[in-house]
Image: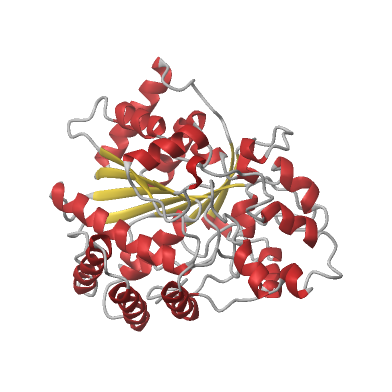
Amino acid sequence: MPLSNDFQHAAYSRSDPGERVSYREFEPGAPPDSLAWQEAMARLGGELAKAGVRAVLFMHGTFLSTDLFGTQRLDEAGGLKRGYSRGIPGVDALLALMREDSNGLGKLSGGQKPPFHDDEQTKKLIDDQAKDAGNFSTDYVEQFKKAINRNVARPIVCTPSLWSSEHHHLGRALAAVQLLSKLRTICTGLTLGSGDRVLVQTHGQAGLVLALISNLLAPGQSSGRKTWIHALTSYLEQTSGTPEGRAQLDNLKQLASLMPAGTVLNGASLDIVTFGTPVRYGWDPSGLGKLLHIVNHRPMRIDGKRWLSKMELPQITMEMPIAWGGDYVQQLAVAGSDALPTSPEAQAANKTLWELLEPYDGFERWLECARKSVRCANDGTCLLVDYKDSTGSSNARDHLYGHAAYTRLNALLFNSTEIVDRLYPPT
């Protein structure tokens, strides 16, 4: 997307990204927490410190009890209910693999559903059930923190962040305010300024929250930002009957006053790495430092376009249950898909945001976007990695349809090495 993107949607371009894309095969390296692993991670920590990285935040949601693929919106807008799938072989089976009640991904014990709160109790519940599948577990973050800080004079702060996992425009917008406020608190608490960097590693649809933030941090005036803030302010004013709601409204007003001058993060640079984030919202790089997208991908096409995923019906319904082609959540949770807000106020606010953020709607438009098979976002660099997670298991909880590989503990060293080599190469 261009500078001053102003909340434009990403384009589903099938053209070769050229030098912006590179390819790797996953190499686990030394076993986690072994001496060789610790030494390798300590070296990477030194490079992060030299580059000015003062804090690393790990942001994720959960697949449990969520409409991860966004089939609620597809069913509301068409799909099987309206007969749009007739004559398209394999669509019925594909939607069955995507729907929350039949995709096999499971639910949180106790019946808890989004919005999830970023607290220790919820985090422990998710850690216990999801383990390290699509989840930056406490163990993952703690091992990273311990290892990278072995030899640095100024310890790098490492923080986990659980977002609400509300997979719709309003949910992501509220999460963007919450995260920006958290990042500002980090920058203020550490007295960060020009020359300092904060690195956010984000998994799945949490990356879309960062795409919104990139548009919010763009310097100068923005008509799209005014519309976005007004829609969110109106919603929060209607629903601010709780201390939490009033705090959200106060945070939004404070952040909005700082955005035009570009002082939200006190001059510190925000670097972002996404793992398996669907191509959806457009990014505005003018308010960011560095941007890298990592996608679990196995080149399977016969036309030589190895930067595209393979989206053929009905074959995809045979490949998807064993994650044969890589990350199918990244591939299918594209424009037109979404979970649905529950309250009338939330639905009205979500519609206003949809009109700003996404020009695509309806089952046929979603199918058109999914068939574009786009893996790489329009901005930043893209790393397509074969994480070798297709083991033949047809149990969705083993691989999350290719969406689980990024956060495995055995991938921590590989991920960290790629991030440092591509964003902060030794000088």
Measured as percent of width and height from the top left, residue 226 is found at 32, 81
Residue at image position (67%, 68%) is 75
Residue at the extreme bottom: 223
Measured as percent of width and height from the top left, residue 342 is found at 49, 67
Residue at image position (31%, 63%) is 177
In which quadrant is the C terminus drawn? top left
Residue at image position (19%, 66%) is 263
Depth check: 53 or 127 in front? 127
Up-down relation of residue 67 to residue 78 (above or below): above
Measured as percent of width and height from the top left, residue 4 is found at 37, 76
Depth check: 415 or 144 in front? 144
Up-down relation of residue 101 to residue 419 (above or below): below
Up-down relation of residue 187 to residue 141 (above or below): below
Measured as percent of width and height from the top left, residue 107 is found at 56, 44
Q: Is residue 155 left or right of residue 113?
A: left
Q: Is residue 253 left or right of residue 68?
A: left
Up-down relation of residue 380 to residue 389 (above or below): below
Colour pattern of the rendering: secondary structure
Q: Quadrant of residue 155?
A: top left
In this orientation, does residue 426 appear?
A: no
